Amino acid sequence: MLESTLVMVKPDGVRRGLIGEVIHRFEARGLVIRGIRSFVFTDELLQANYGHVADRPFFPELRSYLTSGMTVALWVSGVEAVQVVRRMIGDTNARTAAPGTIRGDFAISTQRNVVHASDSVDNAQVELARFFPDGPTVAEDESTVRTLYATTEA
């Protein structure tokens, strides 16, 4: 089933010039980038997206880090996109992320781990609405879907 999910290249990934590499990996896999935007986290946006961990000891440093520079948000679509993207990015703790995953290849930290991705279909819908309030920039293209997937898959 076609799904959409949110991926964010965090400030460490942006500073290291990994935006193109992250996008390339998703496109090479057959996922479609339907929206892209850059921003710097405000306290309000940070609370909306990461408020569920605001009481954790690491939150003040996470806040400082995420508000320190540009983040790039991606609207990524494909069959079972949430699950596919989560496997592609690897474990949150980059030290245990498998080689070949984005975190396994480009990160060594738990917090400065290059990317964020929605962890469920429901959270993807909430996060996409938060970061892309007007919806995706590019409409779903039936010819692209037919190039990537058999008719029984999408």
Image (cartoon, helix red, strand yellow):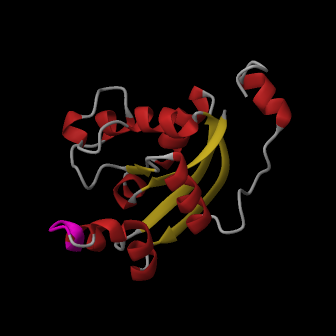
| Residue 118 as seen in the image, left or right of residue 135 | left
**Residue drawn at the location 26% of the way across and 67% of the way down:** 62
**Residue drawn at the location 62% of the way across and 56% of the way down:** 36
Image location (x, y in percent) of residue 122: 53, 52
Residue 66 occupies which quadrant of the picture? bottom left
Q: Is residue 51 visible?
A: yes
What is the count of numbered marks? 0
Of residues 113 and 132, the one nearer the viewer is 132
Image location (x, y in percent) of residue 127: 53, 60
Which quadrant of the rendered structure holds the N terminus? Answer: top right
Residue 69 occupies which quadrant of the picture? bottom left
For residue 44: magenta? Answer: no
Residue at the right extreme? Answer: 143
**Residue drawn at the location 25% of the way across and 55% of the way down:** 111
Which quadrant of the rendered structure holds the C terminus? Answer: top right
**Residue drawn at the location 47% of the way across and 55% of the way down:** 8
Residue at the front extreme? Answer: 122
Which residues are the magenta region?
A: 56-60
